[in-house]
Image: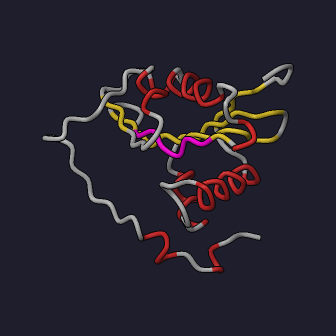
Amino acid sequence: MGSTVIEFRTGIAPLDRHRVWRWLSDDSYWARSIPWTLFDSACDGSLCFGLYDAERIVAFARVITDTATFAWLCDVYVDPGWRSRGLGKLLIDRVMADDRLQHLRRWGLATADAHGLYARHGFAPADASRHMEKVDRELYARLTSPGDCPG
């Protein structure tokens, strides 16, 4: 990171939210084509976290939680121009240290390629005999239309 000062922030401003939506809808494997309205609503119902270089967001994570018993960590993303600088580790370290998330019994997440990042914080493969899910991986593609995109 050199002399760059990276700042951790909670919450996400509207302009930053649009930038993160572009990252996820255009570049991620898990939220490709997510309509703006769904992502915007998801942020409203979640704890959002970001790393910033001055006023520009360079990394993002979202936590869905009741802040009492359970949290789901998702949408962890580092801007491609900022990767390989330890920002993913820094972001997850700060998210996991958030005061609102210290007394949770269960955390969940899904990842195809960052197991080591999360293992540092005690995440391990789930018990397949207990964990169930229902996933519609084509939903966003069916919902997306040009009218879903802001300005």
Instruction: State the image quarter where residue 131 is shown.
Output: top left
Query: Residue 16, relative to residue 22: is it above or below?
Result: above
Q: Residue at x 35, y 65 (%)?
A: 136
Q: Is residue 94 left or right of residue 133?
A: right
Whole-percent x, y for residue 28 in the image: 56, 54
Q: Which residues are magenta?
A: 72-77
Whole-percent x, y for residue 149 in the image: 67, 71
Instruction: State the image quarter where residue 25 is shown.
Output: bottom right
Is residue 131 within the magenta segment?
A: no
Whole-percent x, y for residue 74 in the image: 48, 43
Q: Identify which residue, 109 or 103, lies in the foreground.
A: 109
Query: Residue 146, relative to residue 56: is it above or below?
Result: below
Q: Identify which residue, 83 or 89, lies in the foreground.
A: 83
Q: Identify which residue, 12 or 127, lies in the foreground.
A: 127
Q: Residue at x 40, y 40 (%)?
A: 72
Q: Residue at x 72, y 53 (%)?
A: 19
Instruction: State the image quarter where residue 9 is shown.
Output: top right
Q: Residue at x 86, y 19 (%)?
A: 3
Q: Is residue 125 left or right of residue 97?
A: left
